Image (cartoon, rainbow, N blue to C red):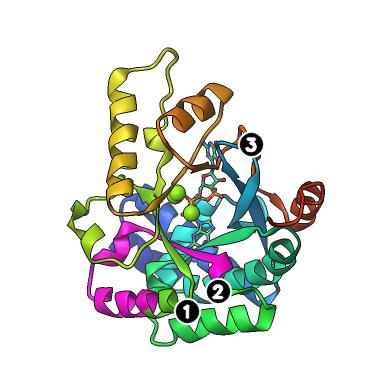
Amino acid sequence: AAKEAGRDQFVCYDPQLRTRHLAQARMVDRLREALDEDQFSVFYQPVVDLQTGRWVGVEALARWESFSPDQFIPAAEDSGLIVALGTWVLRQACRDAAAWHRDHGTRVAVNVSVHQLREANFTVVVESALADSGLPPSALTLEITESVLLGTGMPRAITHLAELRRAGVRVAIDDFGTGFSSLAYLQELPIDTIKIDRAFVPCAQPGDARQFALVRTIVQLARGFRLGTVVEGIETSWQSRVLRLLGCQLGQGYYYSKPIPAAAMTAELAPQSAPA
Ligand code: C2E
Ligand code: MG
Ligand code: MG
Ligand code: MG
């Protein structure tokens, strides 16, 4: 152990960097254990129709003990464990959502990592999650970020997404407008929906004209491409009103509900009427 520590010290002489490396390595070990032992769960945040207030969908969000996804998702991505974790979340979300969809017409959105889209069998993984749960393909949305456009995996990712869309699955661009990609990809990527990042949600009352202009422009862009819009991070009634007036269709945020466990979601959806 002394020899190992000595070697580490030689390689990583920045003690802060060394601490971070160790923390990351420990996190990856614990993630692997947690996957083996079924320690993950999925929480759900409602996606709300801004006109009617109706909960029309949910987003599935991975949860693990007291860690934030912003801590463990990057570690899972770096180590490749995100493929197994992402598959587990997808299968669990399809199982949970099958009953909600049957009883209330609720749709479900699942976050998908670029690593999953690079796997040769991704289409099969999604199709079997749907078949095993009984959730219709048209009730599932896969959320991807602009990062699928980077690196060498892009043609395969597009093939997967195009094939799944032919089966009825929808595709959303998550955190739209926060990446570094050019807008040109909107012509090429097989997508249905833009999720407008919470960075674009107007924050000041009475509000800065430039904030409104940004949202309005993104909404017009989406319309031009016949894409749906979901706004993330709505925290106040004022924001929900403004975003509705700016033409956004759907929204999520703490104003409506934080992400909640599946059983709580079942209880929340119960009073809602059957699908029209
Ligand atoms: P995301 O997909 O953009 O999810 C939205 C995040 O915003 C969630 O954070 C949600 O809890 C948070 N949020 C919702 N409403 C509000 C609000 O009104 N205000 C604020 N400040 N935040 C709000 P969460 O659950 O911590 O997840 C963070 C990110 O981790 C997600 O961002 C997603 O990129 C990633 N993630 C979570 N679960 C998974 C997963 O199963 N697979 C993959 N690949 N990534 C995941
Ligand atoms: Mg998302
Ligand atoms: Mg997002
Ligand atoms: Mg995000």
- Stretch in magenta: 138-162
Q: Does the magenta stretch include residue 25?
A: no
Is there CB contact under 8 Å for labels 1 and 3? no
Mark 1 or mark 3: name the one nearer the start of the chain. 1
Which residue occupies the foreground of this view, 56 or 41? 56
Q: Is residue 133 above or below residue 64?
A: below
Residue at numbered disc 3: 256
Q: Give the residue type at disc 3.
A: Tyr
Query: Residue drawn 62% across and 51% down?
Result: 56
Q: Does the magenta stretch include residue 150?
A: yes
Residue at numbered disc 1: 167
Percent across and percent down for residue 156 are 30, 80
Q: Quadrant of the image for the C terminus? A: bottom right
Is there CB contact under 8 Å for labels 1 and 2? yes
Mark 2 or mark 3: name the one nearer the start of the chain. 2
Query: Residue drawn 69% across and 72% down?
Result: 95
Residue at numbered disc 2: 137
Percent across and percent down for residue 205 are 45, 14
**What distance separates the C-alpha of mark 2 from that of mark 3?**
26 Å
Query: Residue drawn 23% across and 75% down?
Result: 152
Q: Is residue 250 left or right of residue 181?
A: right
Secondary element type, mark 1: loop
Which residue occupies the foreground of this view, 251 or 103? 103
Camera-nearest label, 2 or 3: 2
